[in-house]
Image: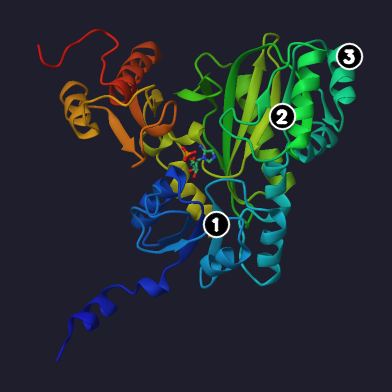
Amino acid sequence: MTTLTDVSARSFDPAAMPTVTMVGGGQLARMTHQAAIALGQRLRVLAERPDDPAAQVSPDVVFGSHTDPVALRRAAVGSHALTFDHEHVPTEHLEALVAEGVNVQPPPSALRYAQDKLAMRTRLSELGLPVPAFTAVETAADAERFGAEHGWPVVLKAIRGGYDGRGVWMPADAAEARAIVGEQRARGVPLLAEARVAWVRELSAMVARSPFGQAATWPVVETVQRNGQCAVVLAPAPGLSEELAAEAETLALHLAAELGVVGVMAVELFETADGELLVNELAMRPHNSGHWGMDGARTGQFEQHLRAVLDYPLGDTTPLAPVTVMANILGAPEAPAMAMDERLHHLFARVPEAKVHLYGKGERPDRKIGHVNILGDDVAAVREKAERAAHWMSHAVWTDGWDPHE
Ligand code: AIR
């Protein structure tokens, strides 16, 4: 007699396909899970809470903290690779996992350059790659000296742990710098100082690299920041010269190889008025500046990350339209009375071409709760539409005054 279990075991054996563990249960893990489904893989997540974006959708959740070695080990056991949705896992725990035979990708030896902003800047300078002037800040006097040398304001950054504008300060003078350094050092937060760069815009060069050494870039994009975090991404970066685009992609490829990155990496860049590129930050995980590729490239970053960490051949990254604009849905100051579901109905009625990705997150001011991708030909028109759609989703207000009930 054939039983149901026999049939399913014969038709598809999920145990023969890889399980990837992702540390962190946020939107990046949620969207990686979406890509894992298509590849026949399982994405196990180490999440803090059942309502974390990825824990809501994965049947394979280990609950615990990314700072707890026991939870990390539980999440790692039996998986083919362990990777990350954020960079906050203590390096020593990852080294312990590697010593136990866990396939940690990117390896801690590479990841440390995305975790430790001082180590990153030091290594990049050694490699001769362009970074803004910087120094370690042990005492307020270090910051004061740096400000006197490079001019105020300077940028103070927490060496570890900050993201989306958190852990960044811009003291206007020595007195402000003293206060910030005093406060942060009292909290045990090591700092660095960086010269403020007169940049004209921010770019991001995304690259994926596999253990085999295969690497692929996407077109360089422009990222538009508001309140210290990414709000809009224009792909490709409008008007970027071929030389600068090639320079940015080459830099990303070179860096990925030099640091031994496995998986995707975003290289956040400043473009200066005199046409120079400076590296601002590195992220060794799927990144907001790559969300456009979910709909706008033949292979998006989430699938590419899985291919890379499992050492599959990488996918074709060719864009599917001349322009893709990604606009983040950022929580409004006050969540609108209209339910998210109703907002989505109205959005689809008005902008049927909008590709919407919602993260299942609570609406808090400025929190990334989803994004909208729109493809097209004309960057200004596509951008207006994407931003209008995203604003509608977070505020239930059309920026062009349109009233759905009229
Ligand atoms: N994230 C990680 N580093 C930067 C970002 N944006 C993503 C990860 C993480 C989530 O944001 O997916 O889990 C945390 O979002 P929040 O809104 O809860 O702080």
Q: Locate residue 83, reporting x and y percent.
A: 56, 55
Q: Quick check: marks 2 and 3 in contact, CB under 8 Å? A: no
Q: Residue at x 55, y 27 (%)?
A: 220
- Going from N to C along the chain, the mark reached first, 1 or 3, is 1
Q: Residue at x 35, y 23 (%)?
A: 334
Q: CA distance from mark 2 to mark 3?
A: 18 Å
**What colour scheme was applied to this rendering of the protein?**
rainbow
Residue that numbered label 2 is attached to: 157
User: Can I make out residue 209 in this image?
Assistant: yes
Q: Quick check: marks 1 and 3 in contact, CB under 8 Å? A: no
Front one among 104 and 402: 402
Please tell me how crowded label 3 is: few (under 14), some (14-19), or many (20+) other residues with Cα within 10 Å: few
Horizontally, residue 368 falls left or right of residue 311, namely left
Helix, strand or loop for disc 1 = loop
Name the amino acid type tagged 2.
Lys
Quadrant for the N terminus in the image: bottom left
Q: In the figure, residue 372 lies in which quadrant?
A: top left
Horizontally, residue 41 falls left or right of residue 304, namely left
